[in-house]
Structures are given as C-alpha cells and as structure tokens.
Image (cartoon, grey):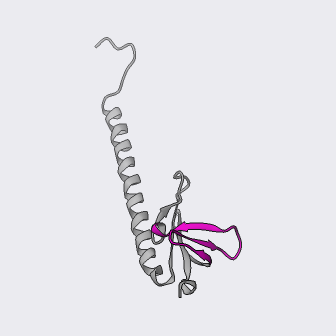
Amino acid sequence: MNNQIKIVKVSAEIEKDEFDFKVSPWRLLLETNRYYEIKPELGPVKRIYKEKLNTVTDETKSYADGFLSCSAFCIEDRVNEMQLEILHKLQLKINAFRDELQLNQKAIEQQKLLPKIEGSTE
C-alpha cells in the first residue's frame, strides 16, 4: 500500500497579469519513517520530509518584474486544497507588499509637505 502513494508538485506563478497553476507528478522511489525520496520525469532525486508534505513554500527570492511563485508537494488527493493554500499565501504576500508600498508612499508625501530648502534663514 505504501508504494501506491502518488506525490505531485503543485506550483503557481504570477507574472504581472498572468497566473498559472501547474501540477506535475513525481515518482516515489523510497519511503522511510521520516521522508520520501521522489523524482520528477526529468531531474534529480529529491528528499521530502514527511512533515513538509502539504506545506506551501514561497519560491520568490526577491520581488522583481511582478513575479511571484509558490509550490507544495502533496499527495494526489490534496491538489485542490494545496491550490487554495497557495492562492491564500500569494494573496497574503501581495497584501504585505501593498502595505509596505503604501508606507513608502506616505513617507514621500510627507516630504512634499515639508520641503527642505538649504541655506534658508527662516
């Protein structure tokens, strides 16, 4: 029965106004008490610790050009649940960026209200 488990990688990418979900199957090579060794069709073997299964990972190292990415390894039955969690994580990230940008905008606007004039004798 353990060999029947089907692990997939669910990933999402946003680039400006384009959004894409991908679900790719990974072949289970080995299962231990602590981890799975899995392999995609093309690429190296990866070790996924069981506690990390069904956990969304932020793959965006730094925000640039409107690009964000998240992924999760899960069993095949949980794809829809992982897609919802990924959407939620991406929305939280976008909200955090928006909040930070609003603070930056506020700082700029405050500078406009209080111009600093060098050499002023007022």
Q: Is residue 46 in view?
A: yes
Residue at the front extreme, as displayed: 33
In the image as oriented, which residue stretches furthest toward the left? 122
Which residue is at a point 61% across and 75% down the rendered structure image? 30
* The one of 22 and 42 positioned closer to us in this rendering: 42
In the rendered image, residue 21 lying in the magenta stretch gets the answer no
Number of numbered labels in the structure image: 0
Horizontal side of residue 75 vs 105, given as left or right: right
Magenta highlight on residue 49 = yes
Q: Which residues are magenta?
A: 29-51
**Which residue sits at x=39%, y=48%?**
101
Residue 6, quarter of the rendered image:
bottom right
Quadrant assignment for the C terminus: top left
Residue 21 visible (yes or no): no
Side (left or right) of 32 relative to 80: right
Residue 70 in the image: x percent, y percent?
A: 50, 65
Residue 80 in the image: above or below residue 47: below
Q: Nearer the viewer, residue 72 or 103?
A: 72
Residue 117 x/y as whole percent: 37, 20
> In the picture shown, does residue 7 fall above or below 58?
below
- Quadrant of the image occupied by residue 83: bottom left
- Residue 119 in the image: state x and y as whole percent: 38, 13
Q: Is residue 106 above or below residue 33?
A: above
Tell which of 117 and 47 is nearer to you: 47
Tell me the residue at 45%/67% (across/down): 51
- Please tell me whether residue 81 is drawn above or below residue 56 in the rendered image: below
